[in-house]
Amino acid sequence: MLSINPEEQIKKITSFIKDTLGMQNKQNVVLGLSGGVDSSVSLNLLARVLGPDNIHPVSLPYFEDKSLDTEEALKGAGIPSNYLTSLSIKQMADKIIGELKIPEEDTLRRGNVMTRVRMTVLYDMAKKLDALVCGTENRSEKLLGYYTRFGDEASDFEPILHLYKTQVYELAKYLSVPVSIINKPPSANLWENQTDEGEFGFSYKEADPVLYLYFNEKKSLEEIEKLGFANAKKIIEFAKNNSYKHHTPYKT
């Protein structure tokens, strides 16, 4: 149902990147590199279009990052590790969180601040370098509304937005993205031990076929449930509850 032809996707996406940069008359790209599968795949695809001097990966951790995933992602894309800019956002985010008196238990508000601080840093760097910001959002996240408006959603172009998360994994394996990155639980790194699937209450593997049938094939909930997808109602309701994000700002 969701299987892709990796070579066709590589051609499609690299052509899209070339066309976008040409249309905007830009030669440089800034990419937030988390060490996750989405940003690693995006980096690998950028490297097929641009030389290392034109790709500006940025790591923006809030928590101390002891993993080697960002270095592994760079290595997998053939980009020297010294091309990575690493900047902790903790001091900047904590200042805003403190001024707004956001309680520690309100992890969602605190997380929104962190993602918007990251967006601010990426766009400032893009302005400095006369670059475009490359987004790393996938279709699963978009349909589920799993993003912060004006935060991790903000970008100038989105090379993998048409791919469901499970398709991103399929492409990652084809691109030889390091196994440590592929096997790592997806996380926005907004609080300790936070994972995407922990917040959902279901996995991407469960969600993707349901989302595909509902949004692409226009099947009803009842039709999807009859196909044996036990979590269909939960998944579709999650998407519906966040659907307002696709329509704001409302206009007269």
Image: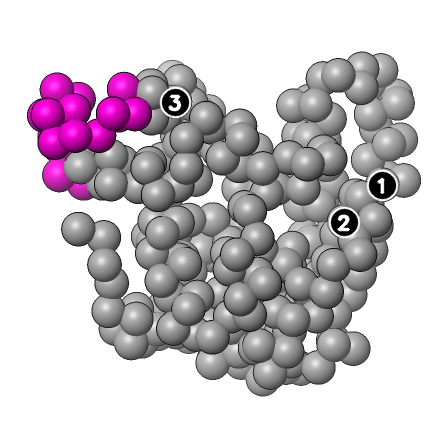
Q: Residue at x 40, y 18 (%)?
A: 241
Q: Is residue 137 above or below residue 236?
A: below
How many neighbours does mark 2 have within 10 angstroms: few (below 14), some (14-19), or many (20 or more)? some
Image location of residue 109, percent across then percent down: 69, 22
Of callouts 1 and 2, the N-terminal one = 2
Q: Which mark is residue 61?
A: 2
Q: Are marks 3 and 2 in contact (CB under 8 Å)?
A: no
> Is residue 146 within the magenta segment?
no
Question: Nearest the camera: 160 or 119?
Answer: 160
Q: Is residue 87 above or below residue 102?
A: below
Q: Amino acid at mark 1?
A: Lys
Would you identify the image quadrant in which residue 245 lies? top left
Q: Amino acid at mark 3?
A: Phe
Q: Residue at x 65, y 55 (%)?
A: 34
- Look at the image and give the residue range highlighted in magenta: 216-233
Q: Which residue is mark 3?
A: 238
Of callouts 3 and 1, the N-terminal one = 1
**Residues under labels 1 and 2: Cα distance?**
8 Å
Image location of residue 24, percent across then percent down: 48, 66
Q: Secondary structure at mark 2?
A: loop
Q: Are marks 1 and 2 in contact (CB under 8 Å)?
A: yes
Image location of residue 168, percent across then percent down: 39, 58
How many neighbours does mark 1 have within 10 angstroms: few (below 14), some (14-19), or many (20 or more)? some
Which quarter of the rendering shows the C terminus? top left
Compared across the picture, whether 68 is left or right of 213 comes to right
